[in-house]
Image (cartoon, helix red, strand yellow):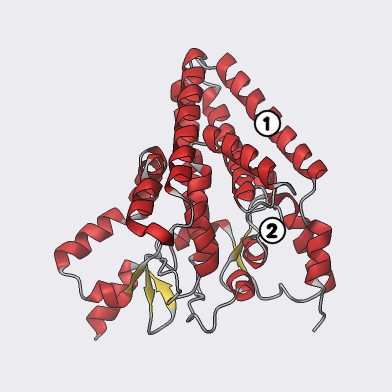
Amino acid sequence: MRIINEGELYMKYKSTYYAALLDLSINMFLLYGGICVLSYFRNTSYVLFIIPIMSLMNIKTFMSLHDCGHNSYTPNKTLNYIIGTFTGIITFTSSWNWNLDHHTHHLTNGNINNPYKFTINETTGMSFNQYTKMNNFKKMILKILLYPYIRFSIIPAIYYGIIQRFYYIIKKLKGGSKIKAPLYVICFNHVINTTGMIYVIRYMYNLEILHHFICYIYISHVIGFLLFHNQHTFNPAYIVTNNDWNHRDSGIIGSSFIQIPYVIKYFFGGIEYHHIHHMNAKIPGYNLQKYHEEVVSKSDVFDNIIKLSMSDCYNNLWLVMYDEDNKRYITFAEADEQIRSK
């Protein structure tokens, strides 16, 4: 087995001010340029082509926010906070409060009895044993709510449009010391985010493109949910106990490498290389592809990572629960078939 020095690779591909400034400058130039183009063609059928591109630009902006939350976008924590707050406003995400859960996600992904008592998979939290104990009415309701075309269209709107506005204040009040951030910091971040969003909404309204803006924001949030689901919900499933869990396996075994089509790779900011991100979240998204390619060229470390095609990602949307006995994610149809065969 060929080996690599991961410490040296990290030092080579960690964030720099130059790379971050270049990435952010291109991102903001394209985003603002797209808004200007959208405003100019707002009353024409061209918006049908512009809105999907703007939704992808919003995803790219969200990836900058995401890296700022990990303090991996730039070498400076304060600068990361400023950029993360700004990008959170224009992507309709309470960035620093969202990171309270996201950091826990990195500490628990695939750990079935994690010390944080956090859901091991936020998009597929139900087990087969739990499902078997439900009555037929509850099963029917779940099948409706978790039907992919409903689940991945309604939940993103509720989560980003409503829950993100106050959710972490409630979590802090209920969780107390389990949530490390002080309540006043959580409230401050919510106020800054919501105030900034109101300004952005007024700006889009003055440009007469508010309805277009809401449309591309919504599409980007849906894509984000689809992406997040496929980053960890696939077979073979990585679900282990606390004693067997570690960051490295959570990445290489428990996180996928989604095969994003080349023409749109830029918009995903490298997050499709999720196996690396969960190994070391301090490597910025704009360096993940280069990191991956060097590891592949020099070792066999990534030979067995889970690669998901676009059709794999689509099929995975029907995975709704974890089968403890067979150690895999399954669909409602597979669960019902198992129940009938017993």
Q: Residue at x 35, y 43 (%)?
A: 158
Name the element at disc 2: loop
Q: Which mark is residue 302?
A: none
Q: Residue at x 67, y 43 (%)?
A: 78
Q: Seen in the image, is 253 located left or right of residue 317?
A: right
Nearer-the-camera pick, 288 or 166: 166
Q: Sequence-wise, which precedes: disc 2 or disc 1?
A: 1
Give percent across and percent down for residue 114.
45, 74
Q: How many marks?
A: 2
Q: Quadrant of the C terminus?
A: bottom left
Q: Residue at x 38, y 81 (%)?
A: 324
Q: Which mark is residue 28?
A: 1
Nearer-the-camera pick, 218 or 174: 174
Q: Seen in the image, is 324 located left or right of residue 60?
A: left
Name the element at disc 1: helix
Give percent across and percent down for residue 63.
61, 46
To which residue does mark 2 refer? Answer: 282
Q: Seen in the image, is 331 located left or right of residue 195?
A: left
Q: Residues within 10 Å of mark 1 (few under 14, many from 20)?
A: some
Kind of residue at disc 1: Met
Relative to residue 45, is residue 73 depicted above or below?
A: below
Q: Which corner quadrant of the image does residue 157 belong to?
A: top left
Relative to residue 242, is residue 211 depicted above or below?
A: above
Nearer-the-camera pick, 103 or 54: 103
Give percent across and percent down for residue 134.
19, 71
Mark yes or no: residue 312 visible. no
Separation (CA) of disc 2 from disc 1: 23 Å
Q: Quadrant of the N terminus?
A: bottom right
Relative to residue 189, is residue 180 depicted above or below?
A: below
